[in-house]
Image (tube, rainbow, N blue to C red):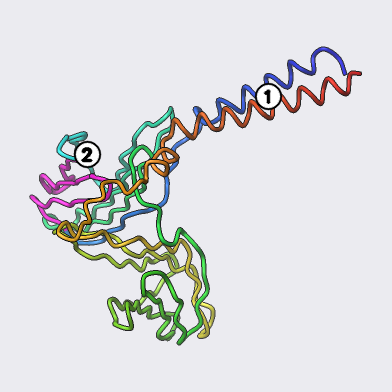
Amino acid sequence: MDGSTPRIIFITLAILLIIPICAGNVHEATICYLEDSVETGDALDLEQGYRLTIDDIRKNDAAISIFNGSEEILNTSISGDYTFKKKIGGIDYDILWISMNLSGGDPAQMELEQYRDPDKPFDYPLIGAVSISIKRGEQESLKMGYELEVTSIIDNNAVLTLYKDDNIVKQEKLSGNGERFVYTTKIDGQRHTILIAKLDRISGNDSVHVSGLSQFKEPESADEGDGDGDNGNWNARLVELPIFRYMLSIFVFACVFVLILGIARQMRR
Protein backbone atom coordinates (compact mmCIF):
# COMPACT_ATOMS: atom_id res chain seq x y z
CA MET A 1 0.00 0.00 0.00
CA ASP A 2 1.51 3.39 -1.03
CA GLY A 3 1.58 6.55 1.09
CA SER A 4 -1.43 8.07 -0.66
CA THR A 5 -3.84 5.51 0.80
CA PRO A 6 -4.14 7.12 4.27
CA ARG A 7 -4.80 10.47 2.60
CA ILE A 8 -7.57 8.95 0.48
CA ILE A 9 -9.10 7.37 3.58
CA PHE A 10 -8.94 10.69 5.45
CA ILE A 11 -10.55 12.64 2.59
CA THR A 12 -13.33 10.05 2.26
CA LEU A 13 -14.14 10.22 5.96
CA ALA A 14 -14.05 14.03 5.90
CA ILE A 15 -16.63 14.01 3.10
CA LEU A 16 -18.82 11.63 5.09
CA LEU A 17 -18.62 13.94 8.10
CA ILE A 18 -19.90 16.97 6.21
CA ILE A 19 -22.73 15.13 4.45
CA PRO A 20 -25.19 15.96 7.29
CA ILE A 21 -24.36 19.65 6.87
CA CYS A 22 -24.85 19.62 3.10
CA ALA A 23 -27.99 17.51 3.11
CA GLY A 24 -31.09 18.96 1.49
CA ASN A 25 -34.44 19.60 3.10
CA VAL A 26 -35.71 16.74 5.23
CA HIS A 27 -38.51 16.19 7.69
CA GLU A 28 -39.23 13.96 10.65
CA ALA A 29 -42.39 11.91 11.22
CA THR A 30 -45.83 13.49 10.84
CA ILE A 31 -47.27 14.36 14.25
CA CYS A 32 -50.31 16.41 13.24
CA TYR A 33 -52.58 16.41 10.21
CA LEU A 34 -55.60 18.65 9.69
CA GLU A 35 -57.95 19.11 6.75
CA ASP A 36 -60.67 21.65 7.41
CA SER A 37 -62.24 24.96 6.49
CA VAL A 38 -60.63 28.05 8.04
CA GLU A 39 -61.54 31.72 8.06
CA THR A 40 -59.98 35.04 8.98
CA GLY A 41 -59.28 35.20 12.70
CA ASP A 42 -58.93 31.45 13.26
CA ALA A 43 -56.12 30.25 15.54
CA LEU A 44 -54.90 26.65 15.51
CA ASP A 45 -52.89 25.24 18.42
CA LEU A 46 -50.52 22.62 17.02
CA GLU A 47 -48.09 20.16 18.58
CA GLN A 48 -44.79 21.05 20.31
CA GLY A 49 -46.01 24.54 21.22
CA TYR A 50 -46.52 25.78 17.65
CA ARG A 51 -49.53 27.92 16.79
CA LEU A 52 -50.92 29.07 13.44
CA THR A 53 -53.19 32.08 13.03
CA ILE A 54 -55.14 33.01 9.91
CA ASP A 55 -54.80 36.79 9.84
CA ASP A 56 -56.57 37.54 6.57
CA ILE A 57 -57.93 35.57 3.62
CA ARG A 58 -57.96 37.53 0.39
CA LYS A 59 -58.78 36.71 -3.22
CA ASN A 60 -55.29 35.64 -4.27
CA ASP A 61 -53.44 35.00 -1.02
CA ALA A 62 -53.78 34.58 2.73
CA ALA A 63 -51.87 36.29 5.53
CA ILE A 64 -50.73 33.89 8.24
CA SER A 65 -48.60 34.01 11.38
CA ILE A 66 -46.71 31.16 13.04
CA PHE A 67 -45.90 31.25 16.74
CA ASN A 68 -43.49 29.24 18.86
CA GLY A 69 -45.16 29.49 22.23
CA SER A 70 -45.98 33.18 22.66
CA GLU A 71 -43.25 34.35 20.26
CA GLU A 72 -44.22 35.18 16.69
CA ILE A 73 -41.57 33.63 14.44
CA LEU A 74 -43.15 34.22 11.03
CA ASN A 75 -45.61 36.62 9.43
CA THR A 76 -46.12 36.10 5.73
CA SER A 77 -48.59 35.75 2.87
CA ILE A 78 -49.11 32.47 1.05
CA SER A 79 -50.93 31.40 -2.08
CA GLY A 80 -51.40 27.69 -2.59
CA ASP A 81 -48.74 25.50 -0.96
CA TYR A 82 -46.26 26.75 1.63
CA THR A 83 -43.59 25.01 3.74
CA PHE A 84 -42.19 26.48 6.94
CA LYS A 85 -38.61 25.31 7.49
CA LYS A 86 -36.26 25.48 10.46
CA LYS A 87 -32.47 25.23 10.24
CA ILE A 88 -31.09 22.83 12.86
CA GLY A 89 -27.43 21.84 12.88
CA GLY A 90 -26.98 23.14 9.34
CA ILE A 91 -29.93 21.12 8.01
CA ASP A 92 -33.22 22.61 6.79
CA TYR A 93 -36.03 20.67 8.45
CA ASP A 94 -39.60 20.98 7.19
CA ILE A 95 -41.81 21.74 10.19
CA LEU A 96 -45.16 22.77 8.68
CA TRP A 97 -46.66 22.17 5.26
CA ILE A 98 -49.76 24.22 4.49
CA SER A 99 -51.96 24.08 1.41
CA MET A 100 -54.86 26.51 0.97
CA ASN A 101 -57.52 26.55 -1.72
CA LEU A 102 -58.33 30.24 -2.11
CA SER A 103 -60.66 29.94 -5.09
CA GLY A 104 -63.73 30.32 -2.89
CA GLY A 105 -62.49 33.27 -0.85
CA ASP A 106 -63.13 33.46 2.89
CA PRO A 107 -63.57 30.85 4.38
CA ALA A 108 -61.06 28.61 2.58
CA GLN A 109 -60.21 24.93 2.60
CA MET A 110 -56.86 24.21 4.25
CA GLU A 111 -54.73 21.11 4.53
CA LEU A 112 -51.95 21.13 7.12
CA GLU A 113 -49.25 18.61 7.97
CA GLN A 114 -46.89 19.11 10.89
CA TYR A 115 -43.62 17.21 11.24
CA ARG A 116 -41.78 16.61 14.49
CA ASP A 117 -39.30 19.36 15.35
CA PRO A 118 -36.13 17.46 16.37
CA ASP A 119 -35.02 20.50 18.35
CA LYS A 120 -37.97 20.24 20.76
CA PRO A 121 -39.14 17.45 23.09
CA PHE A 122 -41.94 15.20 21.90
CA ASP A 123 -43.09 11.81 23.14
CA TYR A 124 -42.28 8.95 20.80
CA PRO A 125 -45.38 7.52 19.07
CA LEU A 126 -47.03 4.39 20.38
CA ILE A 127 -46.87 3.08 16.81
CA GLY A 128 -44.46 4.71 14.40
CA ALA A 129 -45.14 4.82 10.65
CA VAL A 130 -45.79 1.12 10.00
CA SER A 131 -47.32 -0.52 6.92
CA ILE A 132 -50.00 -3.17 7.33
CA SER A 133 -52.60 -5.07 5.33
CA ILE A 134 -56.05 -5.58 6.83
CA LYS A 135 -58.58 -8.03 5.41
CA ARG A 136 -62.16 -6.99 4.92
CA GLY A 137 -64.16 -7.56 8.09
CA GLU A 138 -61.08 -7.92 10.29
CA GLN A 139 -59.90 -5.59 13.06
CA GLU A 140 -56.24 -4.70 13.55
CA SER A 141 -55.37 -4.28 17.22
CA LEU A 142 -53.55 -1.04 18.00
CA LYS A 143 -52.49 0.46 21.35
CA MET A 144 -54.51 1.83 24.27
CA GLY A 145 -57.67 -0.09 23.38
CA TYR A 146 -57.90 1.10 19.76
CA GLU A 147 -58.69 -1.17 16.80
CA LEU A 148 -58.82 -0.37 13.08
CA GLU A 149 -61.28 -2.29 10.91
CA VAL A 150 -61.87 -2.54 7.18
CA THR A 151 -65.64 -2.56 7.40
CA SER A 152 -66.41 -2.89 3.70
CA ILE A 153 -64.92 -2.67 0.21
CA ILE A 154 -67.30 -1.68 -2.59
CA ASP A 155 -66.42 -0.41 -6.08
CA ASN A 156 -62.80 0.29 -5.11
CA ASN A 157 -63.94 2.27 -2.07
CA ALA A 158 -62.93 1.17 1.42
CA VAL A 159 -64.75 2.05 4.62
CA LEU A 160 -62.39 2.17 7.62
CA THR A 161 -63.74 2.16 11.16
CA LEU A 162 -61.74 3.06 14.27
CA TYR A 163 -62.85 1.63 17.60
CA LYS A 164 -61.82 2.45 21.13
CA ASP A 165 -62.88 -0.04 23.79
CA ASP A 166 -65.38 -1.51 21.28
CA ASN A 167 -66.99 1.90 20.65
CA ILE A 168 -66.85 3.53 17.21
CA VAL A 169 -64.93 6.82 17.35
CA LYS A 170 -64.56 7.41 13.59
CA GLN A 171 -65.73 5.89 10.33
CA GLU A 172 -64.73 7.16 6.90
CA LYS A 173 -64.85 6.06 3.27
CA LEU A 174 -61.57 6.32 1.36
CA SER A 175 -61.81 6.20 -2.41
CA GLY A 176 -58.34 6.92 -3.73
CA ASN A 177 -54.76 5.84 -3.16
CA GLY A 178 -52.93 8.33 -0.97
CA GLU A 179 -56.01 9.47 0.94
CA ARG A 180 -55.57 9.86 4.69
CA PHE A 181 -57.51 8.40 7.56
CA VAL A 182 -56.98 10.76 10.49
CA TYR A 183 -58.48 10.72 13.96
CA THR A 184 -58.09 13.73 16.24
CA THR A 185 -59.47 14.60 19.64
CA LYS A 186 -59.75 17.89 21.53
CA ILE A 187 -58.18 18.09 24.99
CA ASP A 188 -58.24 21.33 27.00
CA GLY A 189 -59.38 23.19 23.88
CA GLN A 190 -56.44 21.97 21.77
CA ARG A 191 -56.87 19.43 18.98
CA HIS A 192 -54.42 16.51 19.03
CA THR A 193 -53.79 13.93 16.32
CA ILE A 194 -54.19 10.41 17.70
CA LEU A 195 -54.04 8.28 14.55
CA ILE A 196 -52.78 8.81 11.00
CA ALA A 197 -52.85 6.23 8.20
CA LYS A 198 -52.52 6.55 4.42
CA LEU A 199 -54.38 4.32 1.99
CA ASP A 200 -51.85 2.67 -0.32
CA ARG A 201 -54.04 0.32 -2.30
CA ILE A 202 -57.16 -1.81 -2.27
CA SER A 203 -56.61 -5.43 -3.29
CA GLY A 204 -59.80 -6.45 -5.05
CA ASN A 205 -62.62 -6.86 -2.57
CA ASP A 206 -60.43 -8.70 -0.11
CA SER A 207 -58.03 -6.40 1.75
CA VAL A 208 -56.65 -2.90 2.19
CA HIS A 209 -52.98 -1.91 2.51
CA VAL A 210 -52.17 1.21 4.53
CA SER A 211 -48.79 2.83 5.15
CA GLY A 212 -47.42 5.45 7.51
CA LEU A 213 -49.75 4.30 10.27
CA SER A 214 -48.81 6.19 13.41
CA GLN A 215 -50.61 6.29 16.74
CA PHE A 216 -49.88 8.87 19.41
CA LYS A 217 -50.64 8.86 23.10
CA GLU A 218 -53.59 10.95 24.19
CA PRO A 219 -52.24 13.84 26.31
CA GLU A 220 -53.62 14.08 29.81
CA SER A 221 -55.96 16.91 30.60
CA ALA A 222 -54.41 19.66 32.74
CA ASP A 223 -56.59 18.69 35.70
CA GLU A 224 -55.51 15.04 35.40
CA GLY A 225 -51.76 15.62 35.65
CA ASP A 226 -49.83 13.83 38.35
CA GLY A 227 -47.36 16.64 39.00
CA ASP A 228 -44.29 14.49 38.38
CA GLY A 229 -42.55 17.06 36.19
CA ASP A 230 -40.78 15.56 33.19
CA ASN A 231 -41.09 12.01 34.60
CA GLY A 232 -37.38 11.37 34.15
CA ASN A 233 -37.51 11.66 30.34
CA TRP A 234 -34.37 13.79 30.19
CA ASN A 235 -32.42 10.97 28.53
CA ALA A 236 -34.98 10.63 25.71
CA ARG A 237 -34.91 14.38 25.17
CA LEU A 238 -31.12 14.32 25.03
CA VAL A 239 -31.20 11.71 22.26
CA GLU A 240 -33.61 13.92 20.28
CA LEU A 241 -31.21 16.89 20.24
CA PRO A 242 -29.62 17.42 16.78
CA ILE A 243 -26.25 18.30 18.34
CA PHE A 244 -26.27 14.96 20.18
CA ARG A 245 -27.02 13.11 16.95
CA TYR A 246 -24.31 14.97 15.07
CA MET A 247 -21.69 14.39 17.78
CA LEU A 248 -22.66 10.72 17.83
CA SER A 249 -22.16 10.50 14.06
CA ILE A 250 -18.71 12.12 14.42
CA PHE A 251 -17.81 9.58 17.10
CA VAL A 252 -18.93 6.68 14.90
CA PHE A 253 -17.00 7.96 11.88
CA ALA A 254 -13.91 8.51 14.06
CA CYS A 255 -14.09 4.90 15.23
CA VAL A 256 -14.40 3.73 11.62
CA PHE A 257 -11.41 5.88 10.67
CA VAL A 258 -9.26 4.38 13.45
CA LEU A 259 -10.33 0.88 12.38
CA ILE A 260 -9.48 1.50 8.71
CA LEU A 261 -6.16 3.10 9.66
CA GLY A 262 -5.29 0.06 11.78
CA ILE A 263 -6.11 -2.29 8.91
CA ALA A 264 -4.00 -0.18 6.53
CA ARG A 265 -1.00 -0.39 8.86
CA GLN A 266 -1.37 -4.15 9.15
CA MET A 267 -1.44 -4.48 5.35
CA ARG A 268 1.79 -2.45 5.00
CA ARG A 269 3.71 -4.83 7.27
* Residue 239 place in picture, x, y as percent: 45, 40
Disc sitting over residue 12 in the figure: 1
Disc sitting over residue 253 in the figure: none
Magenta residues? 38-67
Image quadrant containing the C terminus: top right
Q: Amino acid at mark 1?
A: Thr
Left or right, 152 with reference to 184: right
**Residue under the image location 66 percent in, 28 percent down:** 255
Left or right, 145 with reference to 128: left
Determine which residue is flagged by label 2: 68
**Residue under the image location 36 percent in, 70 percent down:** 144
Magenta span: predominant SS is strand
The one nearer the camera, 88 or 223, is 223
Image quadrant containing the N terminus: top right
Decide whether residue 269 is among the magenta residues: no
**Residue under the image location 41 percent in, 36 percent down:** 241
**Residue projecting furthest to the left:** 41
Q: Amino acid at mark 2?
A: Asn
* Residue 72 place in picture, x, y as percent: 17, 35
- Decide: few, some or many residues near mark 1? Use Cα within 10 Å; few <14, some 14-19, many ≥20: few
Mark 1–mark 2 Cα distance, whole angstroms, equals 39 Å
The one nearer the camera, 65 or 11, is 11
| Secondary structure of the residue carrying numbered label 1 | helix
* Mark before the other along the chain sequence, 1 or 2: 1
The one nearer the camera, 268 or 116, is 268
Instruction: Give the answer, above or below, for where 249 lies relative to 208.
Output: above
Q: Quadrant of residue 197?
A: bottom left
- Decide: few, some or many residues near mark 2? Use Cα within 10 Å; few <14, some 14-19, many ≥20: some
Q: Are marks 1 and 2 in contact (CB under 8 Å)?
A: no
